[in-house]
Amino acid sequence: MSSTWKNRISVSIFGQSHGAAIGVTLDGVPAGEKICMDKLNAFLKRRAPGRFPWATPRKEEDVPEILSGIVDGVTCGAPITAIIRNTNTRSGDYANTQTVPRPGHADFTAHVKYGGNADLRGGGHFSGRLTGALCIAGGICLQILERRGIFIGAHIESIGEIYDASFHETLVNEDGIKALCEKDFPAFDANAAQKMIAEIEKVKQDGDSIGGTIECAAVGLPAGLGSPMFDGMENRISQLVFAIPAVKGIEFGEGFGFAFARGSEVNDSFTVKDGKVQTETNNHGGILGGITSGMPLIFRAVIKPTPSISRKQKSVDLNTLQPATLEVKGRHDPCIVPRAVPCFEAAAAIAIYDAILAGGVPC
């Protein structure tokens, strides 16, 4: 089972949710890049489980162990390999999912593809826990990008029918992004945040789960990154965002809203500001023809409700092919959206740093 994204740099993620560890190998990062481990640990802590009542109670510190590629806080040119040890597993909670697949989860497709041999404890290699490894790679790329004046941040745009304020078309900036990254519950509107938290608690008490959307922005990007068609910035980012297991859809800029508009309403007029060509609005989300325009890069994606819920669900016994009722045990997030926010930042950082390494514009 290989989970590798490869372009100018490559990201290979390995491990299972209830195995000894999860980990990542990040190859292609040049030597000489300083990496602050305290900063990387703080980034990973934002995704770590067991910290807040709206998350799974599974408690893991998620402190990365660097095995290669970084010496005395500086990249040495060798592949960077790091692991996060799993220390708080309860594999017995998943005994029944080996033969009775969870609706909405990868249990059935994994059973078919791997001949019944897939490790499904805690979701195995399909678990959202693997995004911890993605965040190691992304956290490293974030630090490198910030030294180049590029900042990436995300927030909870919605949970259920409750919406946060959105990134303004052209006013998103470095200070706003930094402020978001310091919040335990990353939303602009404090009132909306409280309503979201209450909604998560409600579905949790109901033995259910709920989904939502996350919006991500990158500022400080030069115009000219990316290329048309297969290596466009939308393509690069989308591939990495879909590595987050709960993601089921993505849009850039105005996105699906374009379907309900006229060109005269959404075409972004060009202007000159401080000697640079810009657009007056940013409906295109900072990307035109797969190439960055120099405006803030903005995208959002939908996160489905966590499939593991405590309510009884209808399934099938894969041994007998007879109907079965499944009652999922274990510890799960009633809403995965809050912990997925740094995963979006990680995915965007990898894609953007890779595009910079591919060349084409000075940065």
Image (cartoon, rainbow, N blue to C red):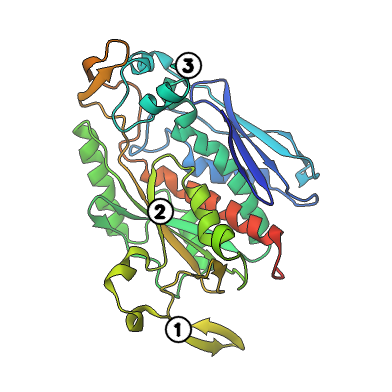
Residue at point 57%, 68% (across, down): 291
Of helix, strand and loop, which one carries label 3?
Answer: loop
Q: Is residue 286 above or below residue 276?
A: above
Residue 26 position in % (x across, y down): 67, 42
Pinpoint residue 259: horizontal percent, then vertical percent: 30, 68
Q: Of label 1 and label 3, which has the lower sequence position?
A: 3
Instruction: Between label 2 and label 3, give the one nearer the viewer.
Output: 3
Task: Find disc 2 in the rendering and name its residue.
Answer: 186
Question: Which residue type carries mark 1?
Answer: Glu
Q: Nearer the viewer, residue 269 or 321?
A: 321
Task: Please tell me how crowded label 1 is: few (under 14), some (14-19), or many (20+) other residues with Cα within 10 Å.
Answer: some
Q: Residue at x 76, y 39 (%)?
A: 69
The residue identified by callout 1 is 280
Q: How many marks?
A: 3
Front tag of 2 and 1: 1
> For the residues marked 2 and 1, what is the alpha-carbon distance in whole angstroms?
28 Å
- Amino acid type for the residue under numbered disc 3: Asn
Residue on which the image places disc 3: 117
